[in-house]
Image (spheres, grey):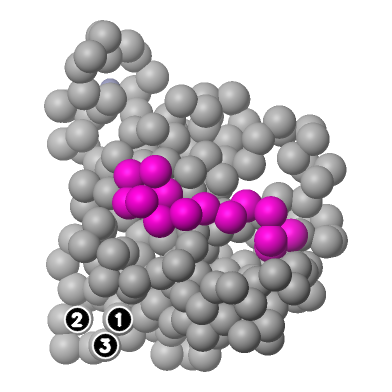
Amino acid sequence: MCGKPTGYGKDLIHKECREKLPYITGAKCLKCGKSVENAEVEFCYDCTKTEHIYDKGRCLYSHNGQMKKSLYDFKYKNKREYAKAYGEELVNNLKYEILAWNADVIMPVPLHKSKLRHRGYNQAELIARELSRRLEIPMDSKILKRTRKTRAQKELNDSDRKKNVKNAFIVDKSIVKYKKVILVDDIYTTGSTIDSCAKVLKEKGVEKVYYVSLSVGTGI
Ligand SMILES: [Zn+2]
Ligand SMILES: [Zn+2]
């Protein structure tokens, strides 16, 4: 989180850094897992106006300044080792909710191959791999592919986000072996990327699509 060393064999996150982490607490949207202010409502504002294709999801942190910085370094500054701490955090906090989905497989939201070549790694895949290892759910990072280069979702408004990722993914026909899939991404905002993936998966017979993301943004 702060980028300073923790020391060999120590916790991956300093105690004082962990205390500042923006965990999503309190009442949560039954669909996307964002926090809702009023505990009486079932769904957040976004989920009442959008009918999602995915079934359910959970996210761990609010995408505030501290998380933005950490995820930015993870994604663009080659801080691949952060995946270990992120994976540990997800499992420590969301393990039972994720296991209750009883999924067959974990899949990272894929990058387009040109972006993968440029960056050298898919940050979502690094997180997915950690989750897979710790929860003993297999990971498949080959079956779902991004076929179109898309713009970064953060640059776009809500309706442009949907257009941007529409038909951006394809899935191999060997998908028939999976019935329940967990998609993993680093940031969830409006859910259009997850929905776009869920659409192709469900068209090929996947029955349930869940998502796990580290951080959740508030949209525009
Ligand atoms: Zn620290
Ligand atoms: Zn929601």
Local packing at callout 2 (Cα closer than 10 Å; few below 14, some 14-19, many 20+) is few
Compared to residue 2, the image places residue 166 above or below, namely below
| Residue ID at (69%, 54%) | 142
The amino acid type found where label 3 is placed reads Glu
Magenta stretch: includes residue 141: yes
- Ligand 1 picture quarter: top left
- For label 1, being within 8 Å of ligand 2 is answered yes
Q: Mark 1 and mark 3 in contact? Answer it, CB < 8 Å.
A: yes
Query: Which is in the foreground here, disc 2 or disc 1?
Result: 1
Q: In the rendering, at what x and y percent does residue 83 appear?
A: 44, 35
Please name the residue that numbered disc 2 is placed on. Answer: 38
Gap between marks 1 and 3, in whole Å?
6 Å
Please name the residue that numbered disc 3 is placed on. Answer: 42
Magenta stretch: includes residue 22: no
Q: Quadrant of residue 58?
A: bottom left
The amino acid type found where label 1 is placed reads Leu
